[in-house]
Image (cartoon, coloured by chain):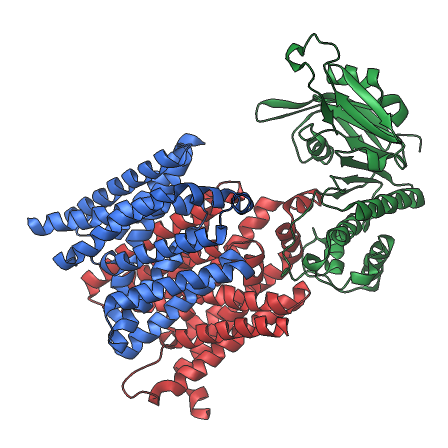
């Protein structure tokens, strides 16, 4: 059982003639809680889709066990005749042919998944009428119902207010601790994840770095990843990654220009 | 009332419309969820060319409609771009070409047979003049299509909610979409024979839109939609039968009653939800 | 000879209006609405003949109420489902009026497929107004129509009213098509819209050349169809319908 939950090496993905990921390699041990961090367009979604096998890619991807996936926000119309419990049931056997025969085992699995995300209260409501945070919970339950070993989440915190985002993070942490499930979730801001993640996978310029937060998020390491000078500033327990006119060489025109990279 | 039920044309009409309504009610739910109402409408219009063709060549209308409905699916597969954004224009182009074909075939009908009422029969339906064996065949066809739809219902629902989720779960989206389009073509073909090619869309979309407003779960929505479609069709036939004496010398088209009932259901469903 | 010139002129005017409207239809993804709204001519004309009020009042009244109804229902229901229901309503009411007024059969063919060669001199002024006004109106509203199609929210931020633009666009579409349809048939108007519009939208990057190209293509398609119909005695709608599909496919293959 010592093998990694996810092992990626030499992964390259091109889209529309452009290389989005170049030689990405990393390992996640079982039970890791890893944040996939990078700015918009850094290739977070591309990496997740490549791991899921949805994109043609070069390199090696080894996932030990079943993968669960929570895509970025799905637009559910309010008149969609699909209750939260129906949606979770589709996670269990939505790919099977034929109508579902109501069975005790099936109902129990769905119920357990809904309970795990604390969504029993609105299980019978139409999914399109739920709030963003409630929908996110149901989508996680949809992925959980087949008891995955590795859970991939694409920007689960986007579109959520601070309170709902904190609840989702706590929920994911608890799930990973209870079941030993490995979690990889993408976010453009690492700060809400700092208290819970034990690893970080940082994407920039098509390359990735993976390791404990303290090791990766430092001025030297991230500067090397970006290929130009980066300042990592820590204020009140928050981390700011700032691109400045530090080395002057590449950015002669950027005089006083400072851009925060979230 | 007994006299009504013993009439041969009425029996055929009841059977034919039941087949169309039950199949279209179930298909319509997915059609609305997948945003394919226009594609469904285009397929109905294309199948009308088959209706005109069957009149011209003297073959069974069911065969003619079906042949062109399936040809329409092939056309849609060729024309439709991969991205969803361009699907609307592709359906429109197909519709134009299909109606163009209908125009030509109807033109030949009129010039060779001198049959004047054909456009009306093909476009607005002629269910009271359907032979009884055609009605039976339609029922068998509808039953078969419903069975196939039940078979693909779950992956189809998942794919209609989110294609990516379905792909991750191992659903073959392209094949699934094609099977659904074929079912859709068969469904609107039956509806085209019942209420006419142009009004087939009403039977496809009306019950489903009302069902969506009322039901919470997918199965309930499908069953409700089927029931509403059936009620509208049979109600429409009864009303058309009753209306013979309302204004002497004038007939009320059955298509009108069916559509009116469907819209009534849709409006009532909206009120009920608000209440 | 002058009779033929009149027909060429009339079909050309319809093509100009349809081409311009078609381009906007494609960028606003309103293909279904463009198919459904012209059908307002059916109940409009039928109701006018049944109740005995002037034809233009029937056409304009039904076309405008159809456009308003569609704009309203689109806000609460799914767009294509709302369009489908409107289409059904228009056709069913039209069928009822025609049936009650007693001359049913011939009108259906004429409404759908048109009888171009039965055009009269009295049709020209109406078509002239449509052929000139629709392109000018759409040209004037090109920017807000494009912006509200791309992002209703951006439009609102900039102080525009996307709902008003939708109503305006649908009303122009319904009026133009509503008056052209009894003359040329719904099929001709519709196939002159979508094929050229979709081709122009794919070939041109910016709105103005797109609008011009769509009008040019529609004109060429209409006149080619008319010529072929004259030679073969087959319906014009067949040639324009199939021709529109051919143009579209050609451009699709070329642009990939």
Q: Which of these two is toward me, B31 or C149?
A: C149
| Nearer to the camera, B9 or B265 | B265
Which quadrant holds residue A114? bottom right
- Name the residue located 48 percent from the left edge and 67 percent from the top edge: B203
In the rendered structure, the answer to whether residue C168 lies left or right of residue C151 reads left
The reply, left or right, for residue C14 in relation to residue C145 is left
Apparent colour of chain B = red
User: How far across and how far down the image is residue A34, in percent?
Assistant: 84, 33
Where is residue C121 drawn, in percent x and y? 12, 57
Q: Is residue A212 visible?
A: no
Tell me, yes or no, if residue C49 can be seen here. yes
Q: Nearer the viewer, residue B43 or C210?
A: C210
**Where residue C190 sits: x, y (%)?**
33, 52
Q: Quadrant of the C terminus of chain B?
A: bottom right
Q: Residue furthest left?
A: C1
In the rendered image of this protein, which colour is used for chain A? green
Image quarter for residue A29?
Answer: top right
Q: Which hue belongs to chain C? A: blue
Q: Report whether A134 appears left or right of C27.
A: right
């Amino acid at each position: 059982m010592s093998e990694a939950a996810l092992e990626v090496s030499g992964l390259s993905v091109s889209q529309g003639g452009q290389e989005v990921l170049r030689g990405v390699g990393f390992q996640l041990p079982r039970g890791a809680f890893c944040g996939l961090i990078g700015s918009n367009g850094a290739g977070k979604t591309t990496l997740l889709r490549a791991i899921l096998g949805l994109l043609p890619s070069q390199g090696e991807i080894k996932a030990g066990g079943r993968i669960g996936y929570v895509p970025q926000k799905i637009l559910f119309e309010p008149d969609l005749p699909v209750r939260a419990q129906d949606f979770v049931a589709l996670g269990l056997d939505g790919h099977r042919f034929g109508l579902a025969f109501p069975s005790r085992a099936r109902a129990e699995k769905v119920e357990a998944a809904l309970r795990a995300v604390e969504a029993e209260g609105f299980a019978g409501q139409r999914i399109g009428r739920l709030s963003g945070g409630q929908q996110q919970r149901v989508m996680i339950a949809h992925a959980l119902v087949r008891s995955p070993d590795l859970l991939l989440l694409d920007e689960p915190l986007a579109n959520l207010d601070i309170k709902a985002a904190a609840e989702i993070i706590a929920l994911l942490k608890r799930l990973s601790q209870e079941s030993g499930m490995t979690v990889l979730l993408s976010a453009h801001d690492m700060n809400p994840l700092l208290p819970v993640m034990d690893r970080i996978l940082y994407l920039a310029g098509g390359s990735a770095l993976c390791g404990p937060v303290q090791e990766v998020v430092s001025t030297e390491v991230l500067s090397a990843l970006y290929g130009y000078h980066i300042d990592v500033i820590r204020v009140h327990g928050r981390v700011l990654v700032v691109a400045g006119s530090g080395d002057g060489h590449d950015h002669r025109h950027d005089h006083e220009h400072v851009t925060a990279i979230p | 009332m007994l006299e009504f039920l013993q009439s041969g044309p009425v029996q055929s009409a009841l059977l034919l419309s039941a087949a169309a309504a039950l199949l279209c009610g179930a298909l319509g739910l997915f059609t609305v969820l997948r945003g394919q109402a226009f594609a469904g409408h285009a397929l109905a219009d294309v199948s009308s060319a088959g209706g005109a063709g069957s009149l011209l060549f003297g073959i069974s209308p069911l065969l003619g409609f079906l042949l062109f409905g399936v040809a329409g699916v092939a056309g849609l597969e060729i024309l439709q771009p991969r991205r969803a954004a361009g699907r609307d224009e592709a359906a429109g182009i197909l519709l134009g070409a299909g109606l163009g074909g209908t125009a030509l075939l109807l033109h030949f009908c009129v010039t060779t047979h001198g049959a004047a009422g054909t456009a009306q029969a093909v476009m607005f339906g002629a269910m009271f003049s359907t032979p009884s064996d055609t009605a039976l065949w339609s029922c068998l066809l509808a039953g078969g299509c419903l069975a196939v739809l039940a078979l693909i219902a779950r992956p189809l629902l998942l794919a209609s909610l989110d294609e990516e989720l379905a792909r991750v779960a191992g659903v073959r989206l392209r094949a699934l979409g094609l099977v659904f389009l074929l079912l859709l073509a068969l469904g609107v073909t039956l509806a085209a024979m019942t209420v006419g090619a142009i009004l087939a869309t009403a039977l496809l979309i009306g019950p489903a839109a009302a069902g969506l407003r009322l039901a919470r779960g997918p199965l309930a929505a499908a069953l409700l939609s089927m029931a509403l479609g059936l009620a509208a069709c049979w109600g429409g036939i009864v009303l058309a039968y009753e209306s013979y004496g309302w204004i002497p010398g004038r007939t009320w088209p059955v298509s009108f009653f069916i559509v009116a009932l469907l819209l009534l259901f849709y409006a009532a469903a909206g009120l009920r939800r608000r209440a | 000879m002058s009779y033929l010139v009149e027909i060429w002129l009339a079909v050309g005017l319809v093509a100009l209006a349809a081409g311009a409207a078609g381009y906007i239809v494609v960028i606003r993804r309103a293909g279904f609405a463009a198919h459904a709204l012209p059908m307002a001519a059916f109940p409009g004309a039928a109701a006018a003949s049944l109740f005995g009020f002037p034809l233009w009042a029937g056409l304009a009244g039904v076309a405008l109420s159809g456009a308003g109804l569609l704009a309203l229902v689109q806000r609460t229901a799914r767009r294509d489902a709302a369009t489908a229901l409107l289409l059904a309503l228009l056709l069913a009411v039209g069928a009822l009026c025609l049936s009650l007024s007693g001359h049913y059969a011939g009108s259906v063919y004429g409404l759908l497929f048109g009888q171009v060669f039965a055009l009269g001199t009295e049709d020209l002024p109406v078509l002239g107004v449509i052929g000139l006004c629709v392109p000018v109106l759409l040209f004037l509203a090109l920017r807000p129509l494009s912006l509200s199609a791309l992002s209703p929210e951006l439009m609102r931020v900039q102080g525009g009213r996307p709902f008003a633009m939708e109503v305006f666009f649908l009303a122009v579409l319904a009026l133009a098509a509503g008056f052209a349809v009894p003359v040329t048939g719904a099929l001709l108007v519709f196939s002159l819209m979508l094929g050229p519009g979709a081709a122009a939208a794919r070939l041109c990057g910016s709105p103005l050349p797109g609008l011009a190209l769509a009008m040019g293509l529609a004109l060429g398609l209409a006149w080619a169809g008319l010529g072929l119909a004259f030679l073969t005695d087959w319906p014009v709608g067949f040639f324009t319908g199939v021709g529109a599909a051919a143009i579209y496919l050609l451009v699709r293959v070329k642009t990939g």
